[in-house]
Amino acid sequence: SSGELALPQSFGAVSLGETFTSFVTFGNFSSNVNAIVREVGLKVELQSERQRVTLYDGTKTPGAALRPGEKMDLIVTKDLKELGAHTLVCSATYYD
């Protein structure tokens, strides 16, 4: 199996005290109609220079199954209380 992550290198500026919001989607884009992914677990974290904060963790109770063409969407938010660059870290676990 293979994975693909597509994010812009830079999404703009968010000022201190503002709320960062991101739409995250995980999809099964296989062209093989029999390629079902099972027990999908998503984790989204926001990394700064000093800490990594978990915004969403669905890896502790994975359970979704996705057929080709299906996807899971979620929205994550975080009030920014630290100056500097932030990195959105997204990971997924699944069985195919």
Image (cartoon, rainbow, N blue to C red):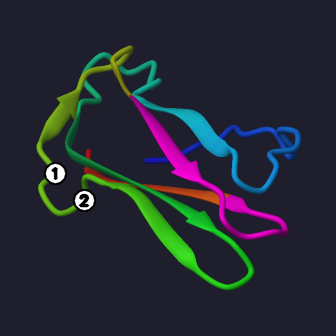
Q: Secondary structure at mark 2?
A: loop
Q: Secondary structure at mark 1?
A: loop
Tell me the kind of residue under disc 1.
Pro
What segment carries the magenta color?
A: 74-87
Mark 1 to mark 2 CA distance (whole Å): 5 Å
Quick check: marks 1 and 2 in contact, CB under 8 Å?
yes
Q: Residue 70: percent from the left, percent from the top? A: 33, 17
Residue 23: say if magenta: no
> Is 32 drawn above or below residue 91 in the view shown?
above
Q: Which mark is residue 83?
A: none
Which residue corresponds to mark 2?
59
Which residue corresponds to mark 1?
62
Q: Answer left or right for 12 relative to 16.
A: right
Identify the residue at horizontal 17%, vertical 63% (top origin).
60
Q: Residue 47: percent from the left, percent from the top? A: 63, 70
Identify the residue at horizontal 24%, vertical 30% (top origin).
36
